[in-house]
Amino acid sequence: MDQSRNIIFLDEHGVIVSHNAMIANSYVDDQDRKTHEQMADPVAVNMINNIAILMNAQFVSSSSLRRNYRTRDSFIDHLDSMGIDSSRLAQHWQICATKELRLERTARIEQYLRNHADCIDSYLILDDITDLRDSFNSVVTPDSKEGFQLKDYNEALKVLGIPLELTSSQAFKSNAPVWERYPDMAMKPPSS
């Protein structure tokens, strides 16, 4: 994939994997990657991949889980196992890798945006930390108990200025790319 100038900062817990799924599976250890990957909500994954297509965006991990992966290749394997389109993983694939706790995620995202300002046109943050709304405009904060839902998809499209008619159930009736399902929309398929 060509280097996109659009970024999705993607959290995992509370977004791709709901807290309800973690409780139901007695999930307590972030090192247990296989269990975590099996709990990924395939509907949430489909909607997030669809947003990436609509934005022509790359993913940057803002999740605390990124610290479990020492290399970009190992993180690609992780994304693949959850169904996230790993071909969209940015070259600089994670916010700064420090031991700072979640309260500092805002500062780390701000630092990433500053460090890459010359190559980012737009961004979207998908994260269950509601405090991020105080610092950024392009944020969708799913309810962490439920994870990323259709209402969050609708909100993301609204934040991005993408027509909301794409949020109807028709948007998910087909596996065809969105530009084939909506040929009248001024959207081009991502370059291969």
Image (spheres, rainbow, N blue to C red):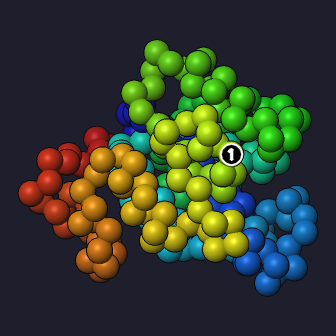
Q: Left or right of 101: which side holds 48?
A: left
The image quarter in which residue 37 lies: bottom right
Q: Is residue 63 above or below residue 36?
A: above
Quarter of the N terminus within the rendering: top left
Mark yes or no: residue 16 visible: no
Q: Which residue is tagged 1?
A: 131
Q: Residues within 10 Å of mark 1 (few under 14, many from 20)?
A: few
Q: Left or right of 82: which side holds 48?
A: left
Q: Residue at x 71, y 30 (%)?
A: 108
Q: Left or right of 111: which side holds 125?
A: left
- Residue 135, x across and y down, in percent: 61, 34
Q: Depth check: give the residue in front, 77 or 3.
A: 3
Q: Residue at x 64, y 74 (%)?
A: 146
Name the residue type under label 1: Asp
- Residue 68, x across and y down, in percent: 82, 48
The single residue placed furthest to the bottom in the displayed view is: 24
Q: Depth check: give the residue in front, 23 or 104.
A: 104
Q: Residue at x 88, y 59 (%)?
A: 31
- Residue 105, x across and y down, in percent: 73, 38
Q: Is residue 139 above or below residue 20?
A: above
Quarter of the C terminus within the rendering: top left
The single residue placed furthest to the front in the displayed view is: 134
